[in-house]
Amino acid sequence: MTPTQPAPFDDDLDFTRPAPVEPPAPTPQQLETAGKEATSGGAELRKAGYYVAIARRATARVPPRNGERHALLVVEDDPDLSTLVAEIFSVEGFEVRSAANRAQINAEVNKAMLPDLILLDIMLPDADGLRILARLRAHPKFARMPVIMMTGKAEPSDVKAGLAAGADGYVSKPFRMSALVAAVNLVLGRA
């Protein structure tokens, strides 16, 4: 690599710049698994009017990075919903940080203490949450970080796209807070 070429991965992420490397497309197996999960979620949506939650159970409890309590990063552009989610998870014992746009996401993911889980909206004012997820999954520091999509996009094809892109869960709006809390606890192995 020459000094004028950027490294494929800086230590920090910057969502305001183009991705240095395009993330790989999902494998056929990832698409098949995500399609099955999305189909089961679609049936639940038709039955109940919302996705209760699609979340992949952690194989083991994810320990808090700070050694005391789990930290969540809530990426949501609706300030009222962001505040409500932060209040609910604070009561549940989580440390909660928030971001509403690319600049705020940059600031949060580049702090010394990373969150333990990201709740990520797809439709943001200046970004696409699925592209953010793809960039996270392509970066070694975030490749295994739990991410749950929290979005108004509720078609089975949307759920399939989110899960195939590497989301650990998918909860559509409107949702019950108890379903969102249950999904987070499941993904972190707290359930």
Image (cartoon, rainbow, N blue to C red):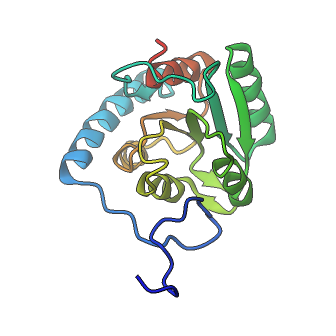
| 66 horizontally vs 184: left or right | right
Depth check, front residue: 110 or 148: 110
Which x, y percent locates residue 62?
47, 24
Identity of the residue drawn at 30% across and 41% down: 34
Identity of the residue drawn at 54% across and 65% down: 10
Which x, y percent locates residue 72?
63, 32
In the displayed structure, 179 sits above or below 98; it is above
| 56 horizontally vs 68: left or right | left
Tell me the quarter of the picture where residue 94 sits.
Answer: top right
Depth check, front residue: 41 or 187: 187
Which x, y percent locates residue 170?
47, 35
Tell me the quarter of the picture where residue 14 sits.
Answer: bottom right
Identity of the residue drawn at 74% across and 36% down: 82
In the displayed structure, 15 sits above or below 29; it is below
| 142 horizontally vs 87: left or right | left
Identity of the residue drawn at 63% across and 27% down: 66
Which x, y percent locates residue 49?
50, 26
Depth check, front residue: 102 or 153: 102
